[in-house]
Amino acid sequence: MSYLNETYQTNADEVLCSYRLEPAPGKDMRAAVEELCKKASVDLIGGAAVKDLIARAYWIKDNTVKVAFPAALFEEGNIPQLLTLVAGKIFGLEKIGSLRLQDLRFPEWWLKTFRGPAYGSALLEKIFDSPDRPLVSSAISPEVGLDLSAYHIKAEASFMGGCDIVRDSPQLNNTKNNAFEARVNALLALAADCADRCGMPKMYFPNVSGPGDVMLRRIEHVLKKGGKGVVVSFQASGFGILQMVRNQFPEIIIYGDRTSHAAMARNKSQGIAMTVLGKLARVAGADLIEIGSITGDMVETEAMVVQLHTNLLADIFRTRFPEQRFDQDWHGFNNSLPVVSGGISAEDIRELRQRFGNHLVLQFVRSMTGQEKVTKQHVERFLDELGPLVPLV
């Protein structure tokens, strides 16, 4: 019996994976695919007891391989376990030269075992009074090193200059000159004060990423001080940690930072695509998810960014590349609000808005707050370059 069956008809309960596979030098493509399926699921030498649990490669064309994994292999509500199967030891196989997980299709039964995002794009209506524009986020630059006083000055300039959100960098946690609890106390009070002065909603998202027990204590402090949202680095912390935060705090707004994603996603022939990482972050419960940008200084293709943006917002996603990607029915699962980031500047906004419309967050870092001295007027001038995007306050 073979793991290859190109006449196999997939069913709705299976997890489907699309891989880009190159066999190792001197190795046969079909033999490499057989090895992938065997190591990712069960070995056929187990006999009749396991024959219904094998992964089946049902599509091989050029370097694309599609594999169907039976539902019985997966635990409910467990992203780390899923990844050990579909993106685990198969990356180390001797017969495979390079391997990239390009896309996943999640079945309804598996999706229904997750809480999902608390708000997603409903943030625009419920928190920010449905602005007829994208939200604007300021991540203070330099991202680590500023003392609390300097950080506070740049945050106030960002809020008063027109930004909706000020958020911590994933590099900033608890430093001697900018302690976590003191920063949370000061910035939450600042956000409330600026909202009163401007007559517009303002939010501060502190970065709580760290060991699980530390994260729980930090989130408790944020909630105690009246905060509604936090930053979680889902790739650096892990999807299991992101799930823990969502499960422990069902109503908190999670700003999903993708720091270190490129270790997995940058090489187009190896690793795990950002499409997969972003979709998993939605499953795990992130309300806002960084997707990169079709402009700026991050290395991504326009097709990848557009696909992820659409997938995060969609209830039913239809791919334009069915030979490599999958349609995804999200079965009523809450969506996530995409965050466009990665070295974008005012010159990029026209193209981004034409492509994405209003359902997104524009995140600026160094281009807006990188100067040594940043004032309300400085941020106003910066945002004024974006045209009618942001009303000055």
Image (cartoon, rainbow, N blue to C red):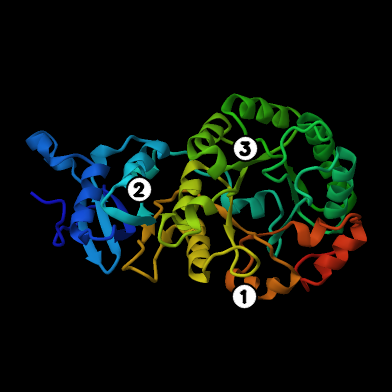
> Which dot, 2 or 3, sits closer to the camera?
2
The residue shown at (26%, 38%) is 73
Which badge, 2 or 1, comes first in the chain's sequence? 2
Q: Residues within 10 Å of mark 3 (few under 14, many from 20)?
A: many
Q: Is residue 77 visible?
A: no
Q: Quadrant of residue 325?
A: bottom left
Q: Position of residue 167 (x, y in %)?
A: 73, 47
**Circle 3 residue:** 252
Q: Which mark is residue 17?
A: none
Q: Nearer the viewer, residue 313 or 308?
A: 308
**Circle 2 residue:** 91
Looking at the rendered structure, the kind of residue marked 2 is Phe
Q: Is residue 226 above or below residue 303?
A: above
Which badge, 2 or 3, comes first in the chain's sequence? 2
Q: Position of residue 160 (x, y in %)?
A: 87, 54
Q: Nearer the viewer, residue 50 or 46?
A: 46
Looking at the rendered structure, the kind of residue marked 3 is Ile
Q: Is residue 276 left or right of residue 62?
A: right
**Real-space Cα distance between discs 2 and 3?**
35 Å
Per the image, label 2 sits on a secondary structure element best described as helix
Per the image, label 1 sits on a secondary structure element best described as helix
**Real-space Cα distance between discs 3 and 1?**
31 Å
Q: Is residue 233 left or right of residue 372?
A: left
**Real-space Cα distance between discs 2 and 1?**
38 Å
Q: Residues within 10 Å of mark 1 (few under 14, many from 20)?
A: few
> Which dot, 2 or 1, sits closer to the camera?
2
Contact between labelled residues 3 and 2, with CB atoms less than 8 Å apart:
no
The C terminus, quarter of image: bottom right
